[in-house]
Amino acid sequence: MLHSERGDKVSNHGQAVPLRVDIVSDVVCPWCIIGYKQLEKALEMLSQPFDVDLHWHPFELNPRMPQEGQGLREHLAQKYGTSPGQSGAARSRLTELGQSLGFTFDYFDGMRMVNTFRAHQLLHWASEQGRQTALKLALFEAFFSRREDVSDTKVLATVAGRAGLPEVEAMEILSDGRYTEVVRTEQQYWLDQEVHAVPTFMFNGGYPVPGAQEAEIFVRVLSKVHTNDPA
């Protein structure tokens, strides 16, 4: 599995090419975890070895979402005009696709879309601890697989603990908001780069790939990265 940060090797065969992967995403975006899983699959398919340096960047699908959240069905209908039938079909498709990629979507009646700004603050802190990917994946699992409210501070601290981070420090960070401004600044940076939908992937500072593409698309892009590497 691609739990790689700070140069973990995907393959030990041949000359590994440095690969910085920047992923702009939100933890309540189902296509973000699908896209990550497709990238993971692509890296396993490739014969070319990469040293992967993975970075997650904040994006809020719903920056004005109130702290109490909103019912998922109501939210989808209000934001996208999605009918109950369309919403159900989309959830079934995601559930099947997730299962094929090794991720569990557990959609349920009463599921709510929530505010994710606190989660992004923890993710910034986790990047400084070398545990950002572990926390990101734990947050995806918490929201989509474990029916947990990833806007709740106690839940977030618990999830941080699962990702190998100290829960007490996580609570302190959420309480004092020390990463508020840096996360806001980073969010604005990506908006200024015309990233208005997620997931968005960037490889070695270029080769942008928008959306949760199939693994074969990532394979083609990564092959270009490998071919064009100056080393």
Image (cartoon, helix red, strand yellow):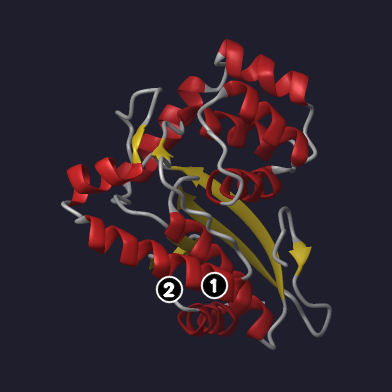
Q: CA–CA distance between discs 2 and 1?
A: 7 Å
Foreground of the two, 167 or 124: 167
Q: Residue 132, relative to residue 155: is it above or below?
A: below
**Residue sitting farthest toward the bottom:** 47
Q: Is residue 208 visible?
A: no
Circle 2/circle 1 CB separation < 8 Å: yes
Q: Residue at x 63, y 56 (%)?
A: 54
Compared with 184, 223 (above or below) is: below
Q: Is residue 89 left or right of residue 153?
A: left
Looking at the rendering, which quadrant does residue 186 occupy?
A: top left
Count the marks. Answer: 2
> Tag on residue 59?
none
Residue, disc 1: 38
Find residue 224 and report its horizontal and vertical position in percent: 51, 82
Q: Which of the marked residues, 2 or 1, is nearer the chain's N terminus? A: 1
User: What residue is pinned by disc 2?
Assistant: 213
